[in-house]
Amino acid sequence: MNTSVTQNGLPLYTIQRVIDYISQNLHQEIQVADLAEVAKISHFYFCHVFKQSIGISPYQYLIQQRVERAKQLLQDSEMAIAEIALECGFSNQSHFTRRFQQMTGLTPKVYRNQQKLLTYYASFSSTT
């Protein structure tokens, strides 16, 4: 087990445990307090050291991971956007769309259509 400590004092294995928890539970409601519990430290201290270690707040990291998962589902599945929103842990499609657009500059629908076009053109150009 890696017992190294980040420059700001949080052990790397603790960060990894939190990141693994997020990855395994993206589809569920996750509160920052849950993450602090996984790290076995107080909520306030967790928020402080997580941001120092990762560069963004725990909440921002969680949203970022949910959007990344949604991008995969939009590209690789035909699931409805509302279904993807719930699968990625967003409370509703509206919240999902707002956060997705903030992070990507595109709505989920536009992103999906763009990815389909890119895939089409990539397959077309590889056959010529």
Image: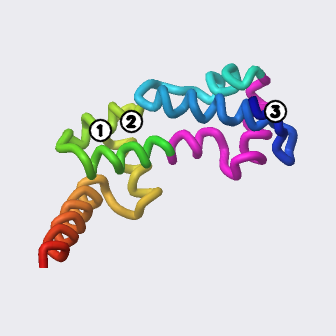
The quarter holding residue 59 reads top right
State how far apart marks 3 and 2 are (Cα): 31 Å
Please, what secondary structure does the residue beneath circle 3 have?
A: loop
- N-term mark: 3 or 2: 3
The quarter holding residue 19 reads top right
State how far apart marks 1 and 3 are (Cα): 37 Å
Region in magenta: 41-64
Please, what secondary structure does the residue beneath circle 2 have?
A: loop
Give coordinates of residue 34: x percent, y percent: 62, 22
Q: Which residue is mark 3?
A: 3
Q: Which residue is mark 1?
A: 84
Give coordinates of residue 49: x percent, y percent: 79, 39
Does the stretch in magenta take in 59?
yes
Give coordinates of residue 54: x percent, y percent: 69, 48
Q: Which residue is mark 2?
A: 88
At x 75%, y 37%, the residue is: 12
**Which residue occupies the foreground of this view, 37 or 128?**
128
- Badge 1 amino acid: Ile
